[in-house]
Amino acid sequence: MIKNKTKLLKAFPDSRLLLDLADEALRFLSPENLIKNSIHLKGEKLKIEGQIFDLKNYKKIFVIGAGKATYFMAKEINKLLKNRITEGFINVPQAITKKLGKIIVNRAGHPFPDENGLKGTKEILKIAEKASKHAKKTKERVLVICLISGGGSAMLPAPIAPLSLKDKVEITKQLLKSTATIHEINTVRKHLSAIKGGNLAAKIMPADLIALYISDVKNDDLDIIASGPTVLDKSTSSDALNILKKYGIKNTKAEKVLEVNETPKSINNKKVKNYVIGSNTVALKHLRKFLEKKKYSVEIFPDFLEGEAKLIPKKLFEKVKNQKKPPSEKNKIYIFGGETVVKIIGKGFGGRNQELALSAIKEIPETAKLMTLATDGVDGIAPVPVAGAIITGDLKRLCKEKNIDIEKYLKNNDSYSALKNLDCLIYTGPSGTNVGDIAVILNQNTLAISSKYNENK
């Protein structure tokens, strides 16, 4: 999956383990694989995490959804259910095909909503209302399967009047430029939306709803993933107002919406079933098993990747340094998961993984190695999609040789240009999934076995 793996191995001969871990993470996290691992169909019995749904009971089955991984989720669901699907519509960043069986595929804007996304969201809401009306009118059971993944917030725009799509985009841009967390950003988004924050589930009732989520947020909070369209909202409009005030964002229309609108606070839980089938935590646990089979000792620090990206490396290496290493744990590998933020003050290219990686060059011990990976394969904004980077102690010397002023590049938010010059970027292209970011550190004790691993490959 790593397009420049051969080149990276020549530049960093002891990095094969790190690159293999990146490949394994992306293979495991492919939406098709997550669907196959979580959902099984035997005859007419659909089994999801131990719960069984008898498809014979449903007169109609609709499929809807939005997000970076949703196309491939829908592809696998279509393969599984085939002609049982009545109708469907999904919003995705890339419409690889126009249809998947009876599921219409619509390209929607990301990271900022666009008119295509707005039109697609209206179609999704039409299907939700169609399912609801049929269930009410005929008293027959109707099933809606909703496929949600990271990026779904941007791809499900439904601003509440008088707020326009342009207003919503501007507010989103301001939040992304600030150091607001994904929880804060999505709290605002769902309180300005007619579909997020449980509104979609409310519109589908009394039809049955199965929502399958691939999580890209801390602790897999369902009400935050894609702004929780099928999940009751824990936050309030007052919370959203306070977030706008906290970051100095002023918009009269948004304030009017927040003063008079609230998200649904009650729903029939027997009718709604939400499942997280993939997440950062799930990925880290899989990587630990992958490494333990190869006789490595692994320490996981889930959700430690949070806060401003360029400030994280110092914390990571201190965390590793402070870990006790008994003789039985010589071959220790440290894995971190989560999602940082970038405070945009410059005009350069890059993303949170690249900024973290560039900053790490200043902090990394001479004998250590670090890999950063955006699981969606697209880290921030750059001329070409970048997934992450490989960082070693040798890069300090290379920065001096190439006259690369790390602080200058960081101040301009131009981590991409610096790392490209160092030939340490990882290119995968869009992976079709997103569960946040992963970082891996090989410490001094690990390097010997890492070299042995390279020889065995």
Image (tube, grey):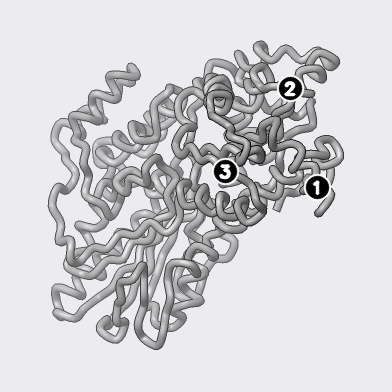
Determine whether 12 is above or below 377 in the image.
above
Could you tell me which secondary element the residue under label 2 belongs to?
Answer: loop
Q: What residue type is labelled 1?
A: Asn
Graded by Cα atoms within 10 Å as few (under 14), some (14 to 19) or many (20 or more), the crowding at tag 2 reads some
Q: Residue furthest front?
A: 327
Examine the rendering and report whether any part of residue 115 can be seen: no
Total labels drawn? 3
- Which mark lies nearer to you, 3 or 1? 3
- Relative image position of residue 167 (x, y in whole percent): 35, 32
- Residue 429 % position (x, y): 67, 48
Q: Which of marks 2 and 1 is nearer the N terminus?
A: 2
Residue 265 rendering spot, x and y as whole percentages: 14, 47
Q: Mark 3 Cα within 10 Å, few/some/many (few <14, many 20+)?
A: some
Residue 366 is marked as 2
- Taking 75 as reference, is 155 left or right? left
Q: In this view, does 448 lie above or below 126?
A: above
Drawn side of residue 195 relative to residue 332, left or right: left
Horizontal and vertical percent for residue 136?
Answer: 14, 73
Between 6 and 59, the one lying in front of the other is: 6
> From mark 3 to mark 1, how far is it between C-alphas?
18 Å
Question: Label 3, on which residue?
Answer: 298
Along the line of sight, the residue nearer the viewer: 290 or 94:
290
Query: To which residue does mark 1 refer?
Result: 454
> Disc 2 and disc 3: Cα gap in Å?
21 Å
Is 161 drawn above or below residue 103 in the view shown? above
Label 2 to label 1, Cα distance in Å? 20 Å
Which residue is found at the position 52% from the left and 22% from the top?
315
> Image height check: is 130 above or below 310?
below
